[in-house]
Image (tube, rainbow, N blue to C red):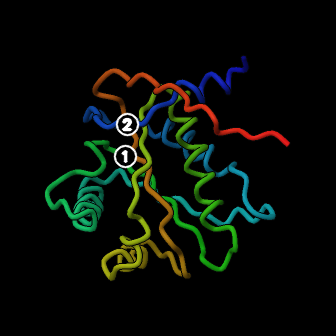
């Protein structure tokens, strides 16, 4: 079996993180993997926002929890780093392109011994006035849609065991 297939089979979503900050070098490698994701017509249109500032991280956590209907809950499970993927809505493949970025980043995080988890509700966050203000503060303009967040950090617990693969999902012609 290939090393990549092993990584794919081993990677799991992590839902409890240590407070330890991830070194910039490792965050950079995870982001680099996202930047090399396939994209429609090779346009490379998704963008990634790296959030390591605790105040901003907590603001985004609060926004996400409110959208989720669980104020006070941390939807990022204590992860000290959040990588947010947005993509321009004018690209017909923007959701797929952003999803591939997140997938690449999850695999690279696992290969580096980091835990990660794709967290939803970025679409709603960055459609809000508060989310638009955050983008403006960063100098990001354009009609972007939030695709997802990647909670990133060191796992606080053992990685969960993979569930058995469901049968009957492949059809041959």
Does 162 appear above or below 25?
A: above
How far apart in space, not on screen, are marks 2 and 1 (Cα)?
6 Å
> Residue at 37% across / 46% down in the picture?
81
Decide if residue 80 is on the left or right side of residue 29.
left
> Residue at 60% across / 65% down in the picture?
95
Residue 64 marker: none
Does 137 appear above or below 66?
A: below
Query: Which residue position holds label 1?
Result: 81
> Residue at 33% across / 82% down in the picture?
129
Does 73 appear above or below 109?
A: below
* Quarter of the picture holding the N terminus: top right
Element type at marker 1?
Answer: strand
Query: Dot 2, crowdedness within 10 Å: few (<14), some or many (≥20)?
Result: many
Horizontal and vertical percent position of residue 19:
25, 35
Query: Dot 1, crowdedness within 10 Å: few (<14), some or many (≥20)?
Result: many
Does 20 appear above or below 60?
A: above
Horizontal and vertical percent position of residue 55:
23, 58
Query: Which residue position holds label 2?
Result: 153
* Quarter of the picture holding the C terminus: top right
In which quarter of the view is residue 90 placed? bottom right
The answer to whether the residue labelled 2 contacts the one labelled 1, judged by CB atoms less than 8 Å apart, is yes
Closest to the observer, 137 or 73: 73
């Amino acid at each position: 079996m290939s090393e990549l297939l092993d990584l794919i089979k081993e990677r799991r979503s992590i839902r409890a993180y240590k407070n330890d900050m991830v070194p910039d070098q490792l965050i950079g490698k995870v982001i680099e993997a996202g930047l090399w994701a396939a994209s429609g017509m090779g346009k490379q249109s998704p963008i990634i926002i790296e959030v390591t500032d605790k105040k901003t991280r907590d603001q985004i956590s609060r926004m996400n929890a409110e959208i989720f209907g669980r104020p006070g809950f941390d939807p990022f499970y204590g992860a000290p780093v959040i990588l947010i993927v947005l993509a321009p809505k004018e690209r017909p493949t923007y959701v797929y392109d952003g999803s591939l970025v997140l997938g690449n980043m999850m695999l690279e995080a696992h290969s580096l011994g980091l835990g990660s988890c794709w967290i939803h509700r970025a679409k709603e966050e960055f459609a809000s006035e508060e989310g638009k203000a955050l983008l403006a503060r960063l100098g990001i303009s354009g009609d972007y849609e939030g695709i997802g967040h990647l909670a990133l950090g060191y796992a606080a617990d053992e990685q969960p065991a993979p569930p058995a693969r469901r049968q009957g999902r492949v059809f041959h012609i």
